[in-house]
Image (cartoon, rainbow, N blue to C red):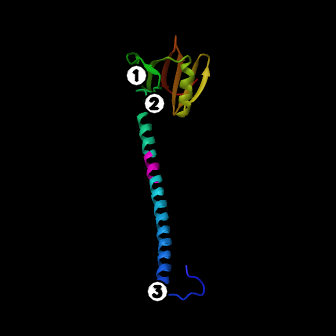
């Protein structure tokens, strides 16, 4: 910068201007780097959101045919040949048996069904669940099998 008491010459003005421009260039450089970092953060966030949605789609819930809002949980297999679905005047009645490696399949299904809006109540060794005018009865069978029966109506 200019020292006090020295006359200002063209060379001094040039030095002052150069120092000012260097400071301005530095400010623009810092702003550009900050903008790039912000842009990269946004891009990374978008990529993470896309990957999250993709992984959710990869694990879409599979629902049992003929059973309204009843999922086939991971670790359970259906005896598809044993599935019965028939229509009555009052609505559709469906039955099937699921097999799993879990010790208490009833507890797992009750928890999953409650998460989907079903209201479940234990009665003796079975569970009665209701949702939108449907009654779903879950009854453990020998081993780790679980029998499901859905009918129109509510528990008696």
Give the residues in magenta.
Answer: 42-47
Contact between labelled residues 1 and 2, with CB atoms less than 8 Å apart: no
Mark earlier in primary sequence (2, 1) = 2
Quarter of the image with the C terminus is top right
Q: Residue at x 40, y 22 (%)?
A: 85
Q: Tell whether 129 sits left or right of 11.
A: right
Q: Which residue is mark 1?
A: 85
Q: Which of 117/134 is in front? A: 117
Q: Mark 3: give few (<14), some (14-19) or many (20+) Cα within 10 Å.
A: few
Alpha carbon separation for disc pair 3 and 2: 88 Å
Q: Which residue is mark 2?
A: 68
Indicate yes or no whether the magenta region holds residue 44: yes
Disc 2 on helix, strand or loop? Answer: loop
Q: Which residue is mark 3?
A: 10
69 lies above or below 11? above
32 lies above or below 81? below
Looking at this rendering, what residue extends furthest in the front direction? 6
Residue 113, how many percent across, how many down? 53, 29
Alpha carbon separation for disc pair 2 and 1: 12 Å
């Amino acid at each position: 910068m200019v020292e006090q008491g020295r006359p200002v010459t063209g060379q001094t003005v040039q030095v002052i201007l150069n120092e000012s421009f260097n400071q301005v260039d530095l400010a623009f450089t810092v702003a550009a780097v900050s903008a790039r970092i912000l842009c990269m953060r946004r891009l990374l966030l978008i990529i993470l959101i896309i990957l999250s949605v993709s992984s959710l789609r990869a694990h879409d819930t599979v629902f049992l045919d003929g059973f309204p809002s009843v999922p086939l949980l991971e670790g359970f297999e259906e005896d598809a040949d044993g599935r019965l679905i028939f229509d009555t005047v009052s609505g559709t009645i469906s039955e099937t048996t699921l097999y799993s490696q879990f010790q208490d399949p009833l507890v797992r299904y009750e928890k999953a069904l409650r998460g989907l809006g079903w209201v479940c109540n234990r009665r003796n060794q079975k569970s009665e669940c209701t949702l939108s005018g449907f009654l779903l009865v879950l009854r453990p069978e020998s081993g780790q099998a679980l029998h499901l029966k859905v009918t129109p109506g509510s528990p008696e």
